[in-house]
Amino acid sequence: MTRGERNARQSKAWLVWLGLLPFFLFGLAFEIIPVLTLVRSSFTDKGALTLNHFERALTPLFIESFRNSIQLSAATAFLGVVFGTLVAHAIVTTRNRFVREAITALADVTTNFGGAPLAFAFIVVLGSTGVVTLILKMVGLNLYPTTFRVYSIQGLTVAYLYFQLPLMILLIIPSLLGLRREWREAAINLGASSFQYWLRVALPFLAPSLLGGFLLLFANAFGAYATAWTLTGPDVNLVTVQIAALVRGEVQLDPALADALAMLSLLVMTICVAGYQWLGGRARKGAR
C-alpha cells in the first residue's frame, strides 16, 4: 500500500468518526451529563458528601412506592412473557404469510404506543363513561366500579400490558425461530410426547430469552410514568409519580430527594438491563 493510499484511508476513517460526532454529543448532553448531575445531587448537600437524601428516601411512603412499582412491573412482565410467548409461537407457526406479517407489524406499532395517548384511550374505552362500560351497562353487566376500575392499579396493569405484550412478542420471535424442526422430530422418534418435548428441549433452550425478556419488560414498566400519571394521577403510589411530584413541587419541592429516588430506580433498572444483556449472550451462544 502506497503512502497516498494509506493517507486516503486515514482521511476516510476521520470522516467516519466526524459523522458520529453528533451522536456522541447527543449522548453526552442527554445521558452522561444528566447521570453525573444526578449522582452529584443525590450524594451532596450544600457541597458536602451526605447520605441523608437516601435515608429520607427509605421512609414508609417511598418504600410503599417502590413496593407498588415492583409488584406492578413484576405482574405485567410475567403476564407479558406468558401471553407474548404464546402469541409469538402462533405467529411463527402459522402458514399464512399475510397474518404473520400483519400481526408482527401490529406488535411493532403497539409496543411504541404509550404515555398519555394510551391512558386517554383506556379512559375512553374502559372509563366510568367509556364505550365498553356503557355497552356492558346496556346488557345488564355493571362491573364498574366495584369489580374493575381503570383508574386503579388494576387498570394500570391492563394498560401496561398493551405495550408489554407486543414488546415480548418482538423479543421472543427470534428465539422461537431458532427452535429446529429436527429437535422435535428426534424427540418424537425417541418416544417423547409434545409436553415432554417442550419441557425438556424447547423450554431449556428458550429459558435465557424468557428470563431476559422478563427483566427487560420489568425495567420497561418500572420506568414508565406518563401512562400511570395520566390514568391514575397520585391515587396509585409509584416511584416515578413520587419523583415527578418532588420535582414539580406539588406537595413539597425537594429535587435532592427526587434525585436519590431516581438513583435507587436507576440501580434497579441497571440490574435488569445487565441481566438482560447477560442472558441475551447466553441465548445467542445456545443458538449456535
Image: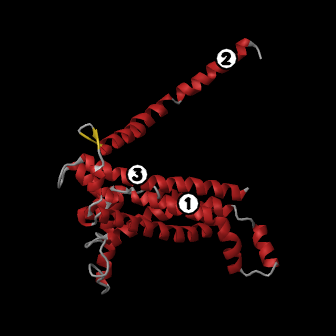
**Total marks in image:** 3
Q: Position of residue 88 (x, y in %)?
A: 59, 66
- Say whether disc 2 or disc 3 marks the residue closer to the N-terminus: 2
Kind of residue at disc 3: Leu
Quadrant housing residue 275:
bottom right
Q: Nearer the viewer, mark 2 or mark 3?
A: 3
Sort mark 3 into few (<14), some (14-19) or many (20+) by Cα contacts within 10 Å: some
| Label 1 to label 3: alpha-carbon separation | 18 Å
- Which residue is identified by label 1? 212
Residue 8: mark? 2
Quadrant housing residue 182:
bottom right
What residue is rendered at 29% in x and 74% in y?
149
- Say whether disc 1 or disc 2 marks the residue closer to the N-terminus: 2
| Label 1 to label 2: alpha-carbon separation | 44 Å
What residue is rendered at 38% in x and 66% in y?
159
- Which residue is identified by label 3? 266
- Say whether disc 1 or disc 3 marks the residue closer to the N-terminus: 1
